[in-house]
């Protein structure tokens, strides 16, 4: 799966990939990770939330996990809300868990991670908001 940039490819991915692991979820409703997740829920995505500082809490009615490895089910999309220096380690954790698309929200992009995941055949979205694209394409 290539770097996803075309509308038709993004729409296809959003329609087929229905489980999303939100990495960096915040309990603060004014933080992007929170309100983006709320919109994703409204579009019918099944969310798995990850934030080690909030592990065990419930946000948006979903349990928060300490890591991707703690999620009991398969995930399609890893939606990243962390700073670029944290992204390579998150990509490594995602590889161990298994996923189809690694989605880096605006401001979270790691050029080295984009290149590596693309070369390894993973789907990659960088610099686009999953909320915006879901609202626009679904």
Image (cartoon, rainbow, N blue to C red):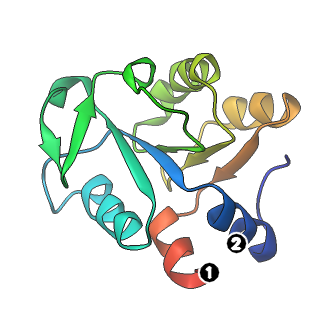
Look at 44% across and 72% down and name the residue there: 43
SS at mark 1?
helix
User: 84 above or below 108?
Assistant: above
User: In front here: 77 or 103?
Assistant: 77
Q: Which quarter of the picture shows residue 8?
A: bottom right
Residue farthest to the front? Answer: 73
Q: Secondary structure at mark 2?
A: helix
Q: Real-space Cα distance between discs 1 and 2? A: 6 Å
**Taking 102 as reference, is 45 above or below it?**
below
Q: Identify which residue is drawn at 29% across, 65% down.
A: 38
Residue under the image location 42 percent in, 36 percent down = 83
> Percent x, y for residue 101?
66, 44
What residue sits right under mark 2 in the picture? 11
Camera-side residue: 109 or 134?
134
Is 63 placed left or right of 93 in the picture?
Answer: left
Establish if 122 lies above or below 27.
Answer: above
Which quadrant of the rendered structure holds the C terminus?
bottom right
Which quadrant of the figure has residue 34?
A: bottom left
Q: Could you tell me residue 82's position as x and y percent? A: 40, 37
In this rendering, position of residue 129 left or right of residue 5:
left
Q: How many marks?
A: 2
Residue 58, position in %: x, y?
14, 42
Question: In the rendered image, which quarter is residue 6 located in?
Answer: bottom right
Name the residue rendered at 19%, 55% in the picture: 60
Q: Nearer the viewer, residue 56 or 94?
A: 56
- Pointer 1 or 2: first along the chain: 2
Of the pair 109 and 17, the residue shown nearer to us:
17
Q: Which residue is mark 1?
A: 137
117 displayed left or right of 2: left
Q: Are marks 1 and 2 in contact (CB under 8 Å)?
A: yes
In the image, which disc is placed on residue 54? Answer: none
């Amino acid at each position: 799966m290539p770097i996803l940039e075309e509308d038709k490819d993004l729409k296809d991915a959003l329609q087929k990939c229905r489980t999303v692991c939100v990495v960096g979820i915040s309990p603060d409703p004014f933080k992007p990770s929170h309100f983006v997740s709320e919109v994703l829920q409204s579009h019918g995505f099944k969310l798995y939330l990850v934030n080690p500082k909030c592990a065990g809490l419930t946000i948006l009615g979903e349990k928060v996990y300490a890591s991707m490895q703690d999620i009991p089910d398969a995930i399609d999309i890893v939606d990243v809300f962390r700073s670029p220096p944290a992204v390579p380690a998150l990509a490594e954790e995602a590889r161990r868990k298994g996923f189809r698309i690694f989605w880096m929200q605006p401001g979270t992009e790691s050029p080295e991670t984009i290149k590596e995941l693309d070369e390894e055949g993973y789907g990659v979205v960088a610099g686009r908001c999953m909320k915006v694209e879901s609202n626009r394409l679904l």
